[in-house]
């Protein structure tokens, strides 16, 4: 049962990595219009502020899932290390 649970969690983490890569692509796609709008506005202070806020939101939507995935992976590694019995010398 533990092996099935471990392989299921491993598959879910792999799917999560794929979703994270797609999230990165989404972040780049969303950043291009923001940068173009700053360019079109002539680079005013307000345009830079709105652009900064937009890009910061995009960055957070990319970085927060990455940090969460690392925490989950550490917990899973720690839990699997506790469950595996040490081999006794013969």
Image (cartoon, rainbow, N blue to C red):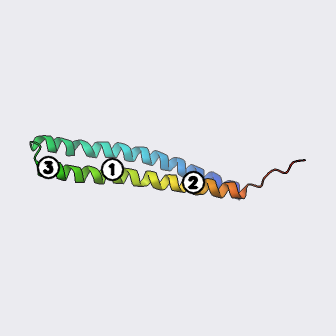
* Quadrant of the rendered image containing residue 5: bottom right
Q: Are marks 3 and 2 in contact (CB under 8 Å)?
A: no
Point out residue 14 in the picture as x, y percentages from the top left corner: 53, 47
Q: Are marks 2 and 1 in contact (CB under 8 Å)?
A: no
Residue 64 seen in the figure? yes
Residue at 52% across / 56% down in the picture? 71
- The label shown at residue 47 is 3
Residue under numbered circle 1: 59
State which tag comes first along the sequence, 2 or 1: 1
- Neighbour class for label 3 at 10 Å: few (<14), some, many (≥20)? some
- The label shown at residue 6 is none
Secondary structure at badge 2 equals helix
State which tag comes first along the sequence, 3 or 2: 3
Residue at 26% across / 49% down in the picture? 55
Marks 2 and 1, Cα distance to the nearest angstrom? Answer: 23 Å
* Quadrant of the rendered image containing residue 84: bottom right
- Neighbour class for label 1 at 10 Å: few (<14), some, many (≥20)? some
Secondary structure at badge 3 equals helix
Number of dots carrying numbers? 3
Residue at 78% across / 53% down in the picture? 86
State which tag comes first along the sequence, 3 or 1: 3
Marks 3 and 2, Cα distance to the nearest angstrom? Answer: 40 Å
Compare residues 78 and 23 and report the one nearer the observer. Answer: 78
Relative side of 8 to 63, left or right: right
Residue under numbered circle 2: 74
């Amino acid at each position: 049962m533990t092996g099935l649970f471990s392989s299921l969690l491993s598959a879910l983490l792999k799917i999560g990595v794929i979703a994270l890569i797609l999230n990165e692509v989404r972040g780049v796609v969303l950043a291009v219009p923001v940068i173009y709008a700053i360019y079109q506005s002539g680079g005013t202070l307000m345009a830079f502020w709105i652009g900064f806020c937009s890009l910061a939101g995009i960055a957070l939507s990319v970085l927060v899932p990455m940090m969460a995935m690392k925490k989950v992976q550490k917990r899973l590694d720690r839990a699997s290390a506790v469950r595996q019995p040490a081999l006794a010398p013969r």
